[in-house]
Image (tube, rainbow, N blue to C red):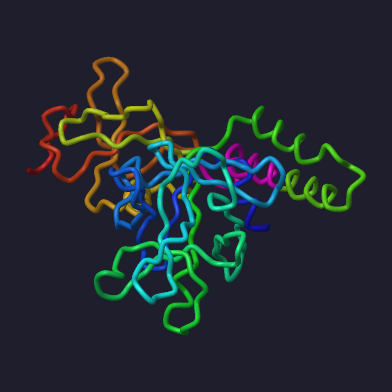
Amino acid sequence: MSAIDLFQNAKTVRLKGSHGKYLVAEADEVSVTQERSCASKSAKWEVEFVESSDTIIRLKSCYGKYLTASNQPFLFRMTGRKVLQTLPPRLDSSVEWEPIRERGAVKLKTRYGRFLRANGSLPPWRNSITHDIPHRTVTKDWIFWEVHVVEFLPPQIAVAKEDCFTSDATSPTSTQSSNSASFSRQEWDDSCGKASDGRLVYFELANEHGEVENEYGEVECIAFKGFQVSELASRLEDELGIPGLTVCTRSPLNRKLHPLRLHLPPNNATMHVVVLPPSSKGSHLFGLQLAK
């Protein structure tokens, strides 16, 4: 599977860097940094494909701004340049990224051969994001990213996207694109609709009172293999970057939350769960008071 296939049917994604932190759009609607937690909406990026290419994408933050490779140096006399959120009057190459797969991860390359980089080390480098060409061995892994699909496109939109990519069947390039898009579509069907790959788990993160504060009405989804509640809880903790979570179902009768016990439903049945943070007081739970 090529790197672009990871984005082919994705509506929103999270990007996890080599330091175990996620690409985040800051609330100033300009800065881009990295954080350990991915629970906030600022860690999600909307995927857009460039109309003239089936290998180039744009990534839009929750503030409606595009991930942008600017020409501003991050530090004086250093090669790294700032990565920002911008909304240019005309969408140019500064907001375009080419996913490249290597060593099981993805690199995001600008049109000028530089790569999105999650920096480490001491301040001011720590948690910063730049685009650069890696020269030192110690920083060569900083340009690799894990792609976590948060939301998939509805099937009809995914099919329409494939049709767009295969419109020029006489071109060798478009034929290759057609095969890639078709393959990606099959993977989407396999990962989201077949029991052989486990179950779908739709989840929402609640606050300490059991209330789901979701501005956009979005429910996130993962494919999960396993039958133990502890395994699911561990997976969701990794997804959200929050330890000590409690996995619950909501009663259809009184809307109270009921913590899951030892085993998940059989036959890889699709699940809808609510995840409580460790700070939860437990007063909203049905049949169980959580320890404070």
The chief SS type of the magenta part is helix
Instruction: Identify which residue, 30 or 156, lies in the foreground.
Output: 30
* Picture layout, residue 265 above or below residue 17: above
Residue drawn 58% across the image and 39% down it? 192
* Picture layout, residue 97 above or below residue 251: below
Left or right: 212 as drawn, with respect to 146: left
Residue drawn 29% across the image and 68% down it? 126
* Picture layout, residue 10 above or below residue 56: above
Q: Residue furthest left?
A: 292
In the image, residue 232 lies in the stretch drawn in magenta: no
Query: To which quarter of the image does residue 125 belong?
Result: bottom left
Left or right: 69 as drawn, with respect to 215: right
Query: Is residue 222 among what the camera can see?
Result: no
Instruction: Identify which residue, 19 or 206, lies in the foreground.
Output: 19
Question: Residue 24 at x, y = what percent?
Answer: 36, 51
Question: Residue 182 at x, y = what percent?
Answer: 75, 43
Left or right: 185 as drawn, with respect to 142: right
Instruction: Work out which quarter of the rendered image holds the C terminus and state it.
Output: top left
Question: Residue 25 at x, y = what percent?
Answer: 36, 48
Q: Residue furthest top?
A: 253
Q: Residue furthest bottom?
A: 137
Residue stretch in magenta: 184-199
Query: To which quarter of the image does residue 36 belong?
Result: bottom left
